[in-house]
Image (cartoon, rainbow, N blue to C red):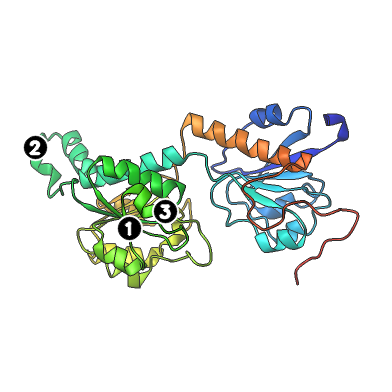
């Protein structure tokens, strides 16, 4: 197969905060198979009239690929979400249209786990307060205030997949006691990792001094940490989110922080990025890191090459391991799609 076949992979990114400038890595991976075009847009409707001819799509950022676009794809053989999360894609509609969708769940695992530990350490050791004190002319160890001893502290991990388990391995090296809640991982995982499994979320929250979130955003996990769950935390608890902003009910979190019912928060993600509530910007008890947990030079390059390789597999009709919507092969585009009502 070569480019003379006219196959096109369309890469969709955002103008604001986008990840790609040129699709050089993608074109290298797709060489001899298809041509790659980059479309940077502010909203999905800007793709109408441009994306219909795509033979495969690589989806970056949070540009929504919903029914209006999906039903217009004339011969798309697959959609690749260049991320772990895939909440911007209507998987049900894509399945009804006969379009397989996959993600890239294994890129950046190390970076997100490292970033989680960096937030944990910075908050536990009060680094922001001490750094500010020194910059303002001080040199007094007491600026750290009250700081917990990490060895023996109880870390509760919500979601024990690739990243959650990587966080656990790092945390145990610091001597933290680790527990997790995840109803979807098989029995015995806790034994393999030497951690404690909790059968309910509330039991884990009651036990934890530090809570770290590592779940995808789905209908089930949206506002997983809401008012009821936040009420189980204390004025000493550290809450860390490097997953998706809407896993936490943000208004409830703001209320909890304002009332002093939560110790500190390390937030790499927010509900309405890039908007940051003033209360979070102003708080000395919140550390914000602009959805950067995934990033290292190597991890971004890895993600781009893996996403392009997945698109190539779709085009060549090869098996894809990380399918999300149950469709293993693209439909025969000589027949119309079975579009959901």
Question: Which numbered disc flags the more N-terminal residue, 2 or 3?
Answer: 2
Task: Give the Cα distance between marks 1 and 2.
Answer: 28 Å
> In the image, 126: left or right of 9?
left
Q: Residues within 10 Å of mark 2 (few under 14, many from 20)?
A: few
Is 77 in front, or is 275?
77
Image quadrant where one finds the C terminus: bottom right
Image quadrant where one finds the N terminus: top right
Task: Give the Cα distance between marks 3 and 1.
Answer: 31 Å
Q: Residues within 10 Å of mark 1 (few under 14, many from 20)?
A: few
- Measuring from the top left, give residue 136's x and y in whole percent: 17, 36
In the image, what residue occupies the spot 42% across and 56% down? 159
> In the image, 75: left or right of 286?
right
Element marked by disc 1: helix
**Eyeballing the image, is 253 above or below 118?**
below
**Eyeballing the image, is 271 above or below 27?**
below
**Eyeballing the image, is 178 above or below 219?**
above
- Measuring from the top left, give residue 146's x and y in whole percent: 12, 50
Callout in the foreground (3, 1): 3
Is 293 in front, or is 169?
169
Say which quarter of the image contains residue 94. bottom right
User: Is residue 13 visible to the viewer in this orientation of the structure?
Assistant: yes
- Measuring from the top left, give residue 279's x and y in whole percent: 32, 58
Q: Kindly identify which residue carries mark 1.
A: 279
Question: Which numbered disc flags the more N-terminal residue, 1 or 2?
Answer: 2
Task: Give the Cα distance between marks 2 and 3.
Answer: 40 Å
Contact, CB < 8 Å: mark 1 with mark 2?
A: no
User: Is residue 20 visible to the viewer in this orientation of the structure?
Assistant: no
Q: Residues within 10 Å of mark 3 (few under 14, many from 20)?
A: many
Residue 305 numbered mark, or none: none
Q: Kindly identify which residue carries mark 2.
A: 140
Q: Kindly identify which residue carries mark 3.
A: 160
Contact, CB < 8 Å: mark 3 with mark 1?
A: no
């Amino acid at each position: 197969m070569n480019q003379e076949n006219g196959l096109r992979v369309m890469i969709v990114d955002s103008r604001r905060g986008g990840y790609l400038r040129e699709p050089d890595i993608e074109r290298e991976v797709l060489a001899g198979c298809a041509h790659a075009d980059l479309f940077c847009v502010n909203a999905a409707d800007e793709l109408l009239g441009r994306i219909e001819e795509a033979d495969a799509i690589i989806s970056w950022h949070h540009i929504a690929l919903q029914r209006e676009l999906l039903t217009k794809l004339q011969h798309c053989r697959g959609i690749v979400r260049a991320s772990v999360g895939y909440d911007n894609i209507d998987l049900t509609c894509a399945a009804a249209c006969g379009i397989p969708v996959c993600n890239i769940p294994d890129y950046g695992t190390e970076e997100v786990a490292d970033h989680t530990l960096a937030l944990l350490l910075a908050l536990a050791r009060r680094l922001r307060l001490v750094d500010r004190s020194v910059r303002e002319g001080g040199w007094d160890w007491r600026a750290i205030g009250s700081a917990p001893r990490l060895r023996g502290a109880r870390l509760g991990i919500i979601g024990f997949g690739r990243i959650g388990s990587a966080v656990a391995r790092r945390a145990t090296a610091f001597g933290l006691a680790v527990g997790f809640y995840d109803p979807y991982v098989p029995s015995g995982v806790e034994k393999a990792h030497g951690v404690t499994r909790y059968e309910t979320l509330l039991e884990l929250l009651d036990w934890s001094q530090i809570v770290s979130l590592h779940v995808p955003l789905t209908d089930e996990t949206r506002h997983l940490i809401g008012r009821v769950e936040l009420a189980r935390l204390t004025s000493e608890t550290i809450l860390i989110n490097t997953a998706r902003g809407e896993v936490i009910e943000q208004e409830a979190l703001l209320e909890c922080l304002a009332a002093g019912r939560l110790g500190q928060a390390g937030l790499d993600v927010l509900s309405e990025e890039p908007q940051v509530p003033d209360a979070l910007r102003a708080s000395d008890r919140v550390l914000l890191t602009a959805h950067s947990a995934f990033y290292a030079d190597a991890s971004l390059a890895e993600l781009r090459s893996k996403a392009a390789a997945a698109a190539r597999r779709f085009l060549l009709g090869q098996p894809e391991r990380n399918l999300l919507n149950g469709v293993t092969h693209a439909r025969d585009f000589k027949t119309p799609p079975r579009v959901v009502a």
